[in-house]
Image: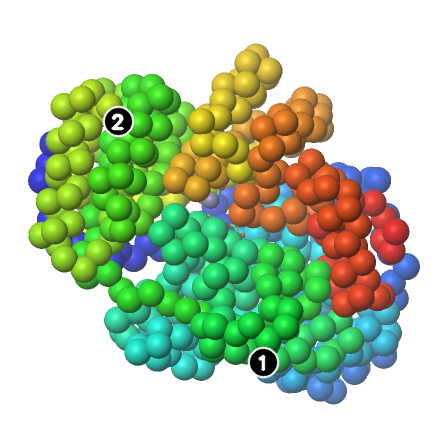
Amino acid sequence: MSSMNKLSATIRTFHSSAARFKKNVEFTAVRYPYLKRGNYSFLSDRHLGFFQSILSPHQVLTDEINDLSGYNVDWMHSVRGSSRLVLRPKTTEEVGAILQYCNAQNIAVCPQGGNTGLVGGSVPVFDEVIMSLGLMDAVISVDELSGIAIVQAGCVLEKLETILHLNNLTLPLDLGAKGSCQIGGNVATNAGGIRLLRYGNLHGSVLGLTAVLANGQIMDCLSTNKKDNTGYDLKQLFIGSEGTLGVVTQVALHCPSKPTSVQVGFFGINSFDNVLETLRLSKQNLGEILSSCELIDQSSLECVTSQLKLKSPDLVNHFPFYILLETSGSNADHDAEKLNSLLEMLLKNGTIVDGTIAVDSTQATNLWTLRERIAEALASEGYVYKYDVSVPIRQFYQLVDVMRARLEKLPIRCCGYGHLGDGNLHLNITSQEYSSELLNKIEPFVYDWVSRQRGSVSAEHGLGLKKRDYIEYTKSPTSVHWMRRMKKLFDPNNILNPYKIFPGTLNE
Ligand code: FAD
Ligand code: MLT
Ligand code: ZN
């Protein structure tokens, strides 16, 4: 057992898909032949001429091989569109002009942030024009006193974090993709991540935003008030709407103070009952300083260490479960004492068998790397069937066992990890390559199981294309009906990210 020490907040860098080996990705339209292209205009020279007249040359990309391929394929290398045009606006007004024209010309548009989405929502299904927000990356203002940052939507999360740290603030959300994902994409997916346990989700942290509607109208909801009860809170509609209701161009975010003491522990645990007991005692004993409680099962740890050649901590044994615990506070001695006492208690009563606590920020980063690079490690194994579900905490791991039993002879692996403290399991199954037969064995069974537990078929990644057919496994038909009506109201021509979120064909 190593002793603990003061840690500064760690920088955990995202390793982009470019570092992973290239896969030949089948076109979405071929893999899912039941998807039918909507009755949209095909891109013409006249359309292109218009875009070139309002944007600079570097804002209009048309080279299919050199420019477009990265925008057409998702991070998982699991879906592939055939867009022939990427537009890169720099201002809210440019976004407005583009959408006004697309709406009038019946051109479908796929908004794209950092393209780290995991449900096939960020790339076109057919030939939708891609609107990439990457050039809108300015941090407009940061105010340490109020904790409010105003940012353009295309700002990469890690860049924002660096600037916040200079102002003694930090982000209320953190995720493994932070080196590439953008705040606008996070808002559009209502991203959760590893700090949700402490700071809640973006419905609480986003104070305001600017969104451009499908007809080009600019909706200014960029309030910085923490309290504002004047009528309906329309900004909430855009949080988690996955680019289907409007394009988010600016965000006002409420940011907490940067913790001056961060500690990370990693525990080996023999049974799932003891995992739950560790969570209960951690919440009870760490209270307000608990900032993360993540689960990693043995198979996930084995994958991340073997695929990425990473070293796991020297514990006495291999365990079926590991918990990564983080505390964030403002008094290192006080926090250390709390975590030490917890550790002592857990070891003494046999809830955990062994564990380690990082002594410096390098060790803390190494422990976090084991957790945050699991997605990347799994992707490098082949095709990943990725499930991101909310389940009642006592049933958190059951689904992994159920699926292992159901799949009998496993393709490669079936593993579970995730945001234990939030009841958010990441169930992942990998196979050498995509197999519709295997997919049919997993779905809809997995969603049916989640639905029977009254869980959610998407805890944080959203529905995108891949999960759209299962929305009613979580939401009632009446809710879906009103969602569709809202979509129709905001985007009557269905030009914004069509084929996403809702099942069935367009304009149903
Ligand atoms: P994209 O992937 O580009 O887009 C996602 C969706 O948002 C698409 O539907 C797109 O059309 C829409 N969109 C993007 N920008 C805008 C905009 N400005 N206006 C309107 N719509 C827009 N998610 C979590 O919730 N928690 C995690 O812990 C987590 N970890 C991850 C770890 C890794 C390694 C990876 C690859 C992904 C992870 N994700 C996680 C998934 C992903 O949802 C987030 O990475 C992120 O929120 C997506 O942001 P992005 O900028 O990449 O958006
Ligand atoms: C995570 O928590 O690591 C992300 O949500 C990505 C994943 O589900 O693999
Ligand atoms: Zn996650």
* Front residue of 492 and 375: 492
Q: Which mark is residue 209?
A: none
In the image, taking residue 301 as reference, residue 41 lies left or right, namely right
**Residue beneath disc 1:** 90
* Front residue of 250 and 72: 250
Label 2 element class: strand
**Residue beneath disc 2:** 268
**Relative vertical location of residue 285 with respect to residue 92 in this rendering, above or below:** above
Residue 327 appears anywhere in the view: yes
> Picture coordinates of residue 154 (x, y %)?
53, 70
Q: Residue at x 65, y 84 (%)?
A: 93
> Picture coordinates of residue 96 (x, y %)?
70, 80
Q: Residue furthest right?
A: 39
Badge 2: residue crowd in 10 Å (few <14, some 14–19, many ≥20): many
* Front residue of 375 and 80: 375
Identified by mark 1, the residue type is: Lys
**Relative vertical location of residue 228 with respect to residue 64 in this rendering, above or below:** below
* Lower position in the chain sequence, tag 1 or tag 2: 1
Q: Residue at x 58, y 35 (%)?
A: 455
* Front residue of 79 and 340: 340
Q: Residue at x 77, y 46 (%)?
A: 478
Nearest to the eye among marks 1 and 2: give it.
2
Residue 410 appears anywhere in the view: no
In the image, taking residue 367 as reference, residue 79 lies left or right, namely right
Q: Residue at x 35, y 77 (%)?
A: 146
> Picture coordinates of residue 271 (x, y %)?
33, 19
In the image, taking residue 305 as reference, residue 224 lies left or right, namely right
